[in-house]
Each structure stands twice: as C-alpha cells, then as structure tokens.
Image (spheres, grey):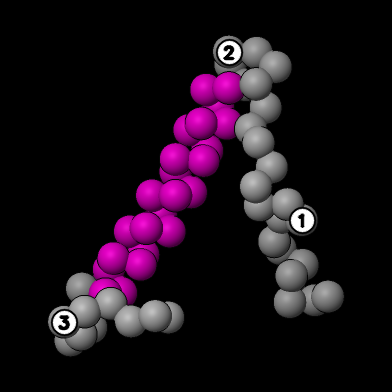
Amino acid sequence: MPAYAGVDSNPLKPIDTSSPRATLQGFIEFTNKAYSEGAGFLNTYMDSSALYLTAE
C-alpha cells in the first residue's frame, strides 16, 4: 500500500531495552516524536478560531 510506505508496520513496538544506552536513546526518540506531533496539533488548534476541539 503506497499510502503507508513511510509508516512503521507496528507503531506499538516497544523500545529496545537491551542496554541502558539503547533504553535512553529509545526514550529520547519517542519523547521527541511525541512532542513534535503534540506541538503541531496544539499549534493548529491555537491558529484556528475554534473554541473547542473537534472529533477530528
């Protein structure tokens, strides 16, 4: 499916905890991704004139 070409096949895949370094690196990557997606969502909401969030 071309629409899903850049998407992980398993978005709930746990981070690598085989070593302390891998655990920290996985945590940092996950946190950075969550922050960027959340900040983008929040910026979109703040730029709109909507008072409440919609189901979308």
Residue that label 1 marks: 9
The earlier-in-sequence mark between 3 and 2 is 2
The earlier-in-sequence mark between 2 and 1 is 1
Question: In which quadrant will I find the N terminus?
Answer: bottom right
Q: Secondary structure at mark 1?
A: loop
Residue sitting at x 52%, y 22%: 24
Please name the amino acid that badge 3 sits on. Leu
Residue sitting at x 41%, y 54%: 36
Depth check: give the residue in front, 54 or 38. 54
Residue that label 2 marks: 20
**Do the residues under discs 3 and 2 have CB atoms within 8 angstroms?**
no
**Do the residues under discs 1 and 3 have CB atoms within 8 angstroms?**
no
Question: In which quadrant will I find the C terminus?
Answer: bottom left
Q: Main secondary structure of the magenta part?
A: helix
The crowding category of the residue bearing disc 2, from other C-alpha atoms within 10 Å (few below 14, some 14 to 19, many at least 20), is: few
Residue 11: x %, y % from top left: 66, 52
Residue that label 3 marks: 51
Distance CA(mark 1)–CA(mark 3): 36 Å
The residue segment tinted magenta is 23-45
